[in-house]
Amino acid sequence: MTAIALNNDYILGRIKLDSFDIVVFDEAHRVVALGEELGQYRYSVHYKQLALSLTTSKKIVVLGLTIPETERTSETERHLAAVGVTSETARAPKTETYAVLLESNDAVKADLWFRAQMWRALNNLRKVLGKKIPWKISEARLIEILEEMELPEWRYKGYIAALRRYRDLYQARQDT
């Protein structure tokens, strides 16, 4: 199960943690994710705490499944004091994704305008955010990042304005 599924079932009283000898987490890298980078989301303290408390139990064996040999894998191993195990014989099934194209000239034009405006704001933010996604970054977190980079405070205003613009455009694009 994922840590979210475990947490939900635990809260709803469907399961008792002491009834397990082994717990297998899928998406184990999500337990340590900060949620600021593309494809990652922030687990709440409760999900993370529940998953991490299981790993410290002497009675329960915890296995975590994650994508092999990625930056996320090494981060997971480091934060969870985990040891990586891989199988040369296990192969994931091939999957295909299909998209249905719905076209409207006005919608396409509006979307292109939003993307162009968002790209401008994003281009300014990339200098300080790197791979982090602006719509997942709060202003407080942006200020922390700027402080960590030891940038002068007079430069904060421009980055905060770019973040606000990006987030406003992102929301307006979603609403549209």
Image (tube, rainbow, N blue to C red):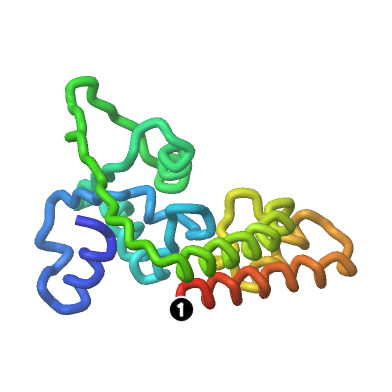
Q: Secondary structure at mark 1?
A: helix
User: Residue tagged by mark 1?
Assistant: 175
Towards the viewer: 97 or 109? 109
In x, y percent, where is residue 22? Answer: 15, 49
Q: Is residue 14 above or below residue 2?
A: below
Q: State left or right for residue 147 relative to residue 11.
A: right
Residue for point 37% across, 62% down: 103
User: Around disc 1, counting alpha carbons within 10 Å, would you say few (fewer than 14), some (14 to 19), or many (20 or more)?
Assistant: few
Residue for point 64% across, 58% down: 119
Residue for point 58% across, 55% down: 132
> Which residue is situated farthest in the top direction here?
88
- Residue 102 lies in quadrant: bottom left
In x, y percent, where is residue 62? Answer: 24, 48
In x, y percent, where is residue 40? Answer: 44, 55
Amino acid, disc 1: Asp
- Residue 81 lies in quadrant: top left
Residue for point 28% across, 27% down: 86
Towards the viewer: 11 or 1? 1
Towards the viewer: 114 or 162? 114
Q: Is residue 90 above or below residue 168?
A: above
- Quarter holding the N terminus? bottom left
> Which residue is situated farthest in the front direction here?
105
Towards the viewer: 10 or 90? 90
